[in-house]
């Protein structure tokens, strides 16, 4: 459920009308709904209430990569969420938004020694370590700083998550984690490293998962490993079950498992683990809390269907080009008629296609359209390709709204490039 509804024939985000926003800010623009974000957090918390998670309850660390806007992160901070970060940049953003360091978990296969040092100095809660060489480097960095890093190994359970290959992370031929079969030996070697204290096990098998079975298989492996590690004398106090739960993109498809179904499965599989459970949801929290608002630049005749050419392009919303992702495209003020169209952006690539032969609300030049479910992996994956300005973002809360990232003037982009001395005179 979300807060994007027609009122008087015009789509609103909570109490704010989209044509009003478009007139004030221009298009393309991302628009996020605070109420939807908070509702998703509440529904997830409610679902996870079924699982035993120790006295402090589950540690929910929002996956910053899904939507790193500082206002969005501040909304997470206010709701008491932590953050899952994969770079120093994401960590600094989370801290800048008011997320306490001890609620931050640092993931990722390529943390540099500098990033580790920065994270240690800030006091992040846990490092999810993805290889033995990484553990050795982290230990050395922590020792040099006179600190001890709290660590979970991310295991690769060799489970097929059944999602798009580019966002699947839990198979043995993916770069992520340490192989499940070698984990016990790796923990034994980690226990001997002076700068780290191994405290947990982590897993994340992929994103936009629409079936609980692979997740359950992965979690069962985590449970088995916790038992083996304890038998070998390790103290295991956290189990990070990652993110990945899918959201509905296409209303004609069966809905993915609900947070309630997910929570019930987690409760069943993790019973008796006696750990603090951790979760790293991204898309689930923000996916359906955001749209990309765009204007139809023109409609051009096509050989089979008309081309609807928008002012949004692949640089604003990359998912359709990169993953053939399907986003619902709706007219903001639907006239009631439908047609079949190809929806494209103005970028000079045929890959700049949002939808082919799509039955949709019929639109004409100047109309506004909304790409639904664009709150996750939308603005954050935008680029300035074709020298297009980076997409601005707006956050709505009830009847209030604010620009939370302004559209930078194109002059800023041009000024960011500097000329070498030998070319300066000509310019
Ligand atoms: N934890 C880890 C270690 C991850 O790698 C990810 C996502 C998450 C949590 C959050 O997953 P979520 O709950 O959002 O599914 N750009 C792609 C998605 C890439 C996901 C990468 N990792 C897309 O647009 O579909």
Image (cartoon, helix red, strand yellow):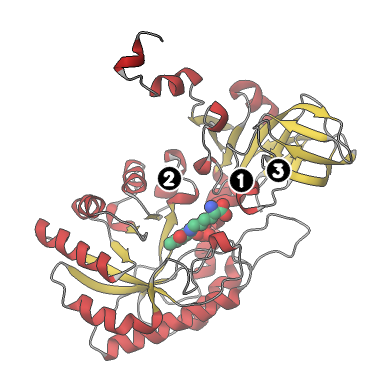
Q: Residues within 10 Å of mark 3 (few under 14, many from 20)?
A: many
Q: Is residue 425 left or right of residue 207?
A: left
Residue 33, quarter of the rendered image: top right
Tell me which label, 2 or 3, sits earlier in the chain: 2
Residue 62's tag is none
Query: In this orientation, which residue lies closer to the viewer: 322 or 58?
Result: 322
Residue, x 45% and y 50% (percent of image)? 65
Q: Is residue 335 left or right of residue 376?
A: right
State whether residue 346 appears in this view.
yes
The Cα atoms of the two marked residues, 2 and 1, are separated by 16 Å
Q: Residues within 10 Å of mark 1 (few under 14, many from 20)?
A: many
Residue that protrudes farthest toward the bottom in the picture: 231
Query: In this orientation, which residue lies closer to the viewer: 243 or 416?
Result: 416
- Which of discs 2 and 1 lies nearer the camera? The answer is 1
The quarter of the rendered structure image containing the N terminus is: bottom right
Residue 134, quarter of the rendered image: bottom left
Say what secondary structure mark 2 lies in: helix
Give the residue at mark 1: 374
The Cα atoms of the two marked residues, 2 and 3, are separated by 28 Å
Query: Does the CB distance between marks 2 and 1 fall below 8 Å?
Result: no
- Which of discs 3 and 1 lies nearer the camera? The answer is 3
Say what secondary structure mark 3 lies in: strand
Residue 316, quarter of the rendered image: top right
Tell me which label, 3 or 1, sits earlier in the chain: 3
- Which of discs 2 and 3 lies nearer the camera? The answer is 3
Residue 354's tag is 3
Residue 73's tag is 2
Q: Residues within 10 Å of mark 2 (few under 14, many from 20)?
A: many
């Amino acid at each position: 459920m979300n807060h994007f509804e027609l009122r008087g024939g015009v789509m609103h985000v909570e109490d704010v009308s989209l044509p009003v926003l478009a007139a004030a800010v221009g298009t393309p623009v991302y628009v996020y709904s605070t109420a939807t974000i908070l509702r998703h957090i509440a529904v997830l918390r409610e679902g996870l209430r079924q699982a035993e998670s120790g006295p402090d309850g589950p540690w929910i660390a929002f996956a910053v990569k899904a939507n790193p806007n500082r206002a969005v992160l501040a909304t997470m901070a206010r709701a008491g969420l932590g953050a899952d970060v994969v770079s120093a940049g994401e960590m600094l953003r989370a801290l800048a938004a008011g997320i306490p360091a001890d609620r931050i978990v640092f993931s990722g296969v390529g943390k540099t020694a500098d990033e580790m040092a920065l994270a240690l100095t800030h006091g992040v809660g846990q490092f999810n370590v993805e290889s033995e060489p990484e553990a050795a480097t982290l230990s050395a960095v922590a020792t040099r700083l006179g600190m001890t890093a709290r660590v979970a190994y991310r295991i690769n359970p060799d489970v097929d998550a059944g999602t798009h290959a580019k966002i699947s992370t839990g198979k043995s031929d993916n770069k992520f984690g340490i192989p499940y079969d070698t984990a016990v030996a790796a923990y034994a070697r980690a226990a001997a490293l002076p700068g780290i204290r191994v405290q947990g096990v982590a897993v994340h098998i992929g994103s936009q998962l629409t079936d609980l079975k692979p997740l359950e298989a992965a979690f069962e492996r985590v449970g088995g490993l916790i038992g083996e590690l304890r038998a070998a004398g390790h103290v295991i106090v956290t189990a990070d079950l990652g993110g990945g739960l899918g959201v509905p993109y296409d209303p004609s498809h069966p809905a993915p498992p609900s947070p309630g179904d997910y929570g019930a499965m987690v409760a069943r599989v993790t019973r008796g683990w006696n750990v603090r459970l951790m979760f790293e949801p991204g898309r689930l929290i923000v996916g359906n809390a955001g749209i990309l608002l765009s204007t139809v630049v023109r409609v051009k005749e096509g050989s089979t269907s008309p081309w609807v050419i928008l002012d949004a392009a692949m640089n604003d919303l990359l998912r359709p080009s990169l993953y053939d992702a399907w986003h619902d495209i709706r007219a903001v003020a639907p006239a009631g008629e439908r047609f079949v169209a190809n929806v494209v952006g103005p970028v000079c690539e045929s890959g700049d296609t949002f939808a082919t032969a799509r039955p949709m609300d019929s639109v004409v030049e100047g109309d506004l359209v909304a790409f639904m479910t664009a709150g996750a992996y939308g603005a954050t994956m935008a680029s300035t390709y074709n020298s297009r300005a980076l997409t601005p973002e707006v956050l709505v809360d009830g009847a209030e709204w604010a620009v939370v990232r302004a559209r930078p003037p194109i002059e800023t982009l041009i000024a960011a490039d500097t000329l070498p001395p030998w070319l300066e005179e000509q310019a």
